[in-house]
Amino acid sequence: MQFGVIIDAFPYLLQASIATIGYTASGIVVGAALAIVVCAARFANSILFQRAALAYVSFCRGVPLLVMLMLIFYLLPLIGILVPASVSAVLALGLCTSGYLAEMLRGSLTAIPRGQAEAAQAFGMTGIDTWRRVLLPQAIRTCLPQVIGEFIALMKASSLISVIGISELTRVSMNIAADTYRPLEAYIGAGIFYLAINLCLAGLGTLAERHFSRGIIA
Amino acid sequence: MNMLQTLWHYAPLLLSGAGVTLWTWLLGSVLGLAIGASVALLRRLPVRPLQWVLRIYIEIIRGTPFLLQLFLLYSGGPSIGIRLSALTAGVVCLGVHAGAYFAEVFRAGFEGLPKGQIEAASSFGMTSFQILYRISLPTMLVAIFPSIVSILISLSKETVILSIITVPNLMYQVQSMTVETYSAFSGIAALAVFYWVFVECVARFSALIEYRLTLFARRDSAEVRA
Amino acid sequence: MNKVPKIAIRDVCKRFGTLTVLDGVSLDVHQSEVVCLIGASGSGKSTLLRCINFLEAYDAGEIRIDGHLMGYVDAAQKQRRPMSDRMLRQARRDIGFVFQQFNLWPHMSVIQNVMEPLLRVRGLSAEVAVKRGEVALDRVGLTDKRNSYPLRLSGGQQQRVAIARALAMEPSLMLFDEPTSSLDPELVGEVLQVMKGLAAEGMTMVVVTHEMGFAAHVADRVAFLDRGRIIDVGPSQQVLHESKEARVQQFLQTYHDRTNF
Ligand SMILES: Nc1ncnc2c1ncn2[C@@H]1O[C@H](COP(=O)(O)OP(=O)(O)OP(=O)(O)O)[C@@H](O)[C@H]1O
Ligand SMILES: [Mg+2]
């Protein structure tokens, strides 16, 4: 093995790591926005909305990311939407993760005692204020650890967007492997970066958890 | 050609692809369960270096993407003398990957065993073998069943990725079909629906089994087992 | 008294599916009066209280607060519709509700809990809300806990915060649903003390309680609910000591047996 290859590749892998984190974060943001909508639909009074949300969640969880990626990659041009591959990638990541995020959010929401919303109602607070001030802040805090877990999982899954030519950690290591004819070293290098990002995220997660759990955990 | 004719024309290829997908999933699962159980058991041995090695295996596998692991074995392997066919590399990779996740689940299962039940069993004079088979294992299996299923489902979705290293599975065949017919979307859409239905079926079926397994814990149906 | 009662409950019925929980309840509560609702578990006390501020929608009958129909647009029984959310919120602003489980919002500090309804519902500025909140906390004797999170407080302290939160809204009427039932016995006193103070200041209060001592000494009147009906109501001494209803006597007897060990 020639570890020199890894050292030479270091700056490229570092840059690619930032891209990986960026795509993952964008995916989570898109996914979270979708998740809030889907979750609202699951709590809606209309059976139709509930069913639709349920089907959506099961679809997102059933379809592998690679398939979702291809689906969007081919679907968008078909319906006349021409966007860069990076947008397709973020959309696919967001769709895939939104089903999981919606379920996490739902879990945290149902864990909040009913009385808390009733107290808000009894004071004459609006439904929107009750959600915005009482329910969501708590739900988001209690599902934070799971969301961080999901972030890490999505970060690893995001290696698949390399197949549509997105230049992230896996793609860059493939290029390095091809250029240097040292695939073993190139992939080990990428692996080291994935592990490092993992550690950083987990650490940040612990900090965030400690910060946001104020009050919720006695 | 319309969609149906296309599908009919490619049916043999698609069927063989589906076969490969199922086969890799099954082999990967069995290999993964075997690795996971062995690792979990070995980790209980009081040998420090061994514990370290196993811990590192688990952390590395769980900390890196499956695709990267696949590349490492399939393209990186030959430079240290490991030459595997795409199919073998794929199955080995699935097994090694799932093994790390299974190992963690089994470990949690061991640790979660309620001490009191074991003490109760030994107070009646049951042998440790009897305790393992009659008390520990059944309790543990019921407790970890949902986690096992969720890993199996994830693994079924990971099998798609093998198409990237040219394992001729369903994804691979659908893609080669779409290359020839220029109707990329419909093929992928059909594949998405296939996976959706498959995963949903597995999830429902296992929920049913889980319900049967945990009947004893439900008050409303306490008599069903009696 | 021929003034309009603070609360006028007329023939109120409430069903959950096929279960009739309130079966024609009528009761007047006058300005500055303290009325205790007692009765066995499941007799419908909480449901009645929750109907008063329309946390539960009653099916038939009327509940009027200061003469205004609660929860429905004033119209003949058959064709009435629930009032708009806006009107309902307006009606609820002036009714304080204290729950058995406190229902403080755990992610907000004590003072934030007290300020929240003032900011959102009364539309006060933060400065004014802080001042009012501090006054309310002072009344329940918890000024020093203003920056704590609720789950770090004892049950009695949490319930006092919940009372302060309701008080800060300056309600004209307060409803208490078993405010001491989830407290350890030695913490019950501090909460009852606060409630006694409120009664002395002339607050109109409806209190569901199993604290017969409070009912006997603080309540002006006691109403006894049994299977969704008020079977006895009157001055507290009369209901608690001289009731002619066998069901009431029996309930109070088991109560005495349990407390006089
Ligand atoms: N949301 C609901 N859905 C269905 N049934 C309900 C609901 N709320 C209350 N009930 C039923 O209505 C009946 C009266 O309940 P309520 O809570 O008013 O009793 P209570 O007198 O307050 O009893 P406790 O002293 O135990 O609090 C009970 O039989 C209860 O099971
Ligand atoms: Mg009650």
Image (tube, rainbow, N blue to C red):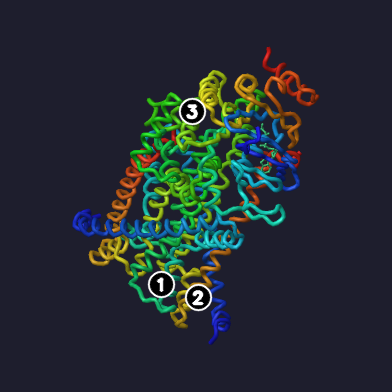
Instruction: Name the residue that disc number 1 marks.
Output: A73
Q: Quadrant of ligand 2?
A: top right
Q: Is residue A216 above or below residue B180?
A: above
Tell me, yes or no, if residue B35 can be seen here: no
The CA span between labels 1 and 2 is 13 Å
Q: Determine the residue positioned at 46% across, 26% down.
A: C140
Q: Determine the residue positioned at 37% across, 49% down.
A: B63
The CA span between labels 2 and 3 is 65 Å
Q: Residue C218: x, y in percent? A: 60, 22
Instruction: Name the residue that disc number 3 marks.
Output: C160
Quarter occupied by the N terminus of chain C = top right
Q: In the image shown, does B97 or C37 lie closer to the viewer?
A: C37
Q: Residue A25: x, y in percent? A: 34, 56
Q: In the image shown, does C213 or C78 lie closer to the viewer?
A: C78
Confirm or reject: label 2 Cβ below 8 Å from ligand 1: no
Q: Is residue C125 above or below residue B26?
A: above
Q: In the image shown, does C249 or C74 lie closer to the viewer?
A: C74
- Amino acid type, callout 1: Phe
Query: Pointer 3 and pointer 1: residues touching (CB < 8 Å)?
Result: no
Q: In the image shown, does A213 or C260 lie closer to the viewer?
A: C260
| Closer to viewer: mark 1 or mark 2 | 1
- Amino acid type, callout 2: Gly
Q: Chain of mark 3?
A: C
Residues behind callouts 1 and 2 on a single chain: no
Q: Residue C70: x, y in percent? A: 61, 46
SS of the residue at dot 3?
helix
Instruction: Name the residue that disc number 2 marks.
Output: B187
| Closer to viewer: mark 2 or mark 3 | 3
Q: Chain of mark 2?
A: B
